[in-house]
Image (cartoon, grey):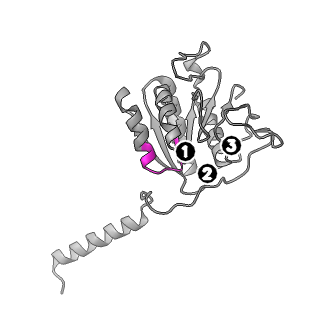
Amino acid sequence: MRSPLRAVATLVAAAALVAGCGSGDDWSRPHAKPTAVGMLGAGFTDPSAPPTPEATVTPRPGSWKGVHPPKGYRVVLLTAGDDRPTRALVSAVEDWAASEHVDLRTVVADGPHDLVPGIGRAVDMGPDLVISAGNDLVDPLAVVTASHLSQQFLVVGAELAEPTHNVTAVDWSGASFRGEGLGMSSTYAPESFTAGRCAAAVRAGVAAVLHNLTGIVIWLDHV
């Protein structure tokens, strides 16, 4: 007859094994390149004239709604700041990830000196996509993203002045912060960061990235 201590040890080991096998937390495992589930609707872009790098496109409202990320899509939400627009964007990303069963992790840059290191931590995790929320991250992203061309970035509610092909942005008149000493846009309006607009920005941006429409700015004034 087995001793009680040995029986307990066996049960603990078995539980740990089951937990390890069932966990979806190990991003170090091989991972296929993600492909979109569903297609972009008419009016997202003009198929006969694909957008050029750094171009701004104004998709037809809702033309991204049929696109979903694949199972196991790995996303890092990179965020800095606690202002109302940033909180609205963070909530939109979290709600989208929950509804789409995305494997989401979050990196919070803690203060000005942690902005560039925070981006580095996000990239080192090896996600399919880094989604940035917060104007404080715009200038640091402009510095870092060109050195990580294989990593896709999505900036919501702001944009980089000169993005590389791996940086896609979703913006509108009430947002449009570009950094690089350009100052805040005269049309900046924190109240424009509504739950509906932020949700549309996340979905439209991800839909573009999944269809390899990257390095562009998606303009959502009519949402």
Q: Earlier in the sequence, mark 1 or mark 2?
A: 2
Give the Cα separation between the discs numbered 1 and 2: 21 Å
Residue beneath label 1, please? 149
45 vs 19, nearest the viewer = 45
* Circle 1 crowding by C-alpha within 10 Å: few under 14, some 14–19, many from 20: few
Tell me which amino acid carries mark 2: Pro
Residue at 35% over, 29% down: 113
Please say whether residue 108 is visible from this viewpoint: no
Residue hosting label 3: 213
**The disc labelled 1 sits on which kind of residue?**
Leu
Of the two numbered discs 2 and 3 on the same chain, state the one appearing first in sequence: 2
Q: Which quadrant of the rendered structure holds the N terminus?
A: bottom left
Q: Position of residue 152 (x, y in %)?
A: 56, 44
Give residue 120's quadrant in the image. Answer: top left
Q: Which residue is located at x 64 percent, y 38 percent?
A: 215
The answer to which quarter of the image holds residue 51 is: top right
Q: Does the magenta stretch include residue 129?
A: yes
Residue 7 falls left or right of residue 191: left
Q: Mark 2 points at which residue?
A: 69
